[in-house]
Image (cartoon, rainbow, N blue to C red):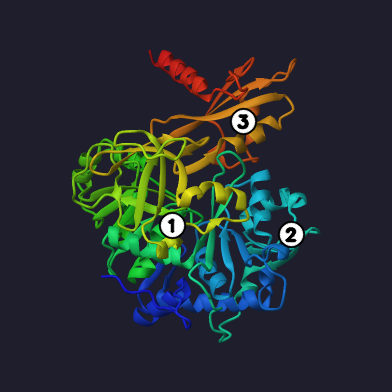
Amino acid sequence: MTHPDPAQPGGVATIVTTLAERARQHPDRYFVRFRESDLTYAAFEARTRSLAAGLRRHRVAGLGGPGGAGAMPSEGGPRIVPTLLPNCADAVVFWFAANRAGAVWAPLNTEFRGPGLAHAINLTGSRDLVADHSLVDAVLEVAGDLDNVERLIVRGGPVPTSGRFATLPLDALDVGDDGAPPAPQPTTAAPSLLIYTSGTTGASKACELSHRYVLGHAHLMARSASVRGDDVLFCPYPVFHWDATIGTIAPALWAGATAVVTERFSVSRFWADVRRYGVTIFDFMGATLTFIYKQEPRPDDADNPARLAWGVPMPAFKDDFEERFGLTLIEGYGSTEGGVMVWQEPGEPYPTGSCGRAIPEFRLRIVDSDDRSLPPGGIGEIVVRPTRDEDRHLMLTGYYRMPDLNREVFRGGWFHTGDLGRLDEDGNLYFEGRSKDAIRRRGENISAYEIEQVIEAHPAVLEAAAYGVPSEYTEEDVAVSVALRPGQELSAEELLDHCRGRMARYMVPLFVRFLDVLPKTPTEKVEKTTLRKWHMRALAETKG
């Protein structure tokens, strides 16, 4: 059974007002559980109130006083509180506290390094940055490229002395409840958080997601997975991603259930965690499900509390996995921009390869390059929109501070996903790949452009092309082909050393190929299709 989301005075529901209602209803029930701390609904709300008071008292991102907006003042944007934190209770509390204080939470990818990290921080326009002590060095390495940051708020460990930034320990923000009510949210479009998604032809973008988006998809997730108040939802993926925030914590909040988030996925600890926390629902990626499935079978595999798991892509061993572990697997299709708008109903059969059908709240079409609808079976771009205009905030409000791109992707009133798919006569969706220049690895959307930028910054490199190649664990691995400057020499290991520390670990290529020149189209674009074919041919010859 789910609960309606309570509205604050003025009629607009937020995650903060919903939290207050759940704390009243279930004060002693666990809301979020991390390995280092567990917080009941009452304890979580108390910490939220205290941290919100600290954000105001210390004027974090310009809160608590006139002027000083977190975003660039000339643009009139919202106040932004960016955090660079690992999976921990503090990260989630910051989300709710920032919203309570009248700001927007921007969780940064903790794997970002170099230009990618500087870009993500600068996009917020904030003068303050909250960072875990283990990540301060990464911030200091790009200090000269940061446009606005004046103060570092450091979680854990010694607070570093830096001539570049003022510093403040995170504990200083824990000041207790000052009695101030939540900041008013005047419209359903009021932003709650920014989630960064990979730029596929440029730098990473930040999706601006409203309270209506968060609560709306919390409801849809809870409905699709039949989440109850006694459920325990488990996510071993980062809190700066959709799966942990909107896909796990938000539906738990909506239903008054419990969310468990561990620091990372561990195949050796997975089932022990499921049993320890009494997990009933978890989400998966194709790669992680493969890792679990490839473990040696045990007689007690089905002796676990889980009843349902959701994720993408669905592996060929679905039926065997369900029987072996005694649970149901369901697949969907979605994105950070629009949430999960296609679902499989638990227990209902679907054609092999299908992601399911669009839920009633969304309309979906397959279109050609001129935005004309294709007949069943035709492969084209997937475009979506909410069924009702009043549900428009089930989509992202927009890419933050990117008006030109927003006009492009929402052209004709439909959100253009950049993904390829086809529909059958019954409306079942089949995902057919990506038209965008992106690589999908271990659940991360990786910008080929960002990888190429880092590699081409090496003095020996003339040109580089990054592309995805099939991985044995589903999704893709990162491969690069590189042309060197005349007279230069460079080994693959030297190139990878250059990449490490300048990009996220998941972006570092697994395969490196040196070529005299990169193959080009007549318009001088690199023919990545040709490079992928060469890779697959070489791999086949090696296996042969």
Q: Of marks 3 and 2, which one's residue comes earlier in the chain?
A: 2
The residue indicated by pointer 2 is 148
The residue indicated by pointer 1 is 244
| Residue 216 location, quadrant | bottom left
What residue is drawn where x is 41% and y is 62%?
Answer: 389
What residue is drawn where x is 57% and y is 43%?
Answer: 199
CA separation, marks 3 and 2? 31 Å
Q: Give the secondary structure at mark 1.
A: helix
CA separation, marks 2 and 1? 29 Å
Q: In which quarter of the image is the N terminus?
A: bottom left
User: Does 284 sit above or below residue 163?
Assistant: above
The residue indicated by pointer 3 is 496
User: Does 295 sit above or below residue 9?
Assistant: above
Q: Position of residue 84 (x, y in %)?
A: 60, 57
Q: Where is residue 249 in the image (x, y as percent from the top left)?
A: 41, 63
Give the residue type at disc 1.
Answer: Ala
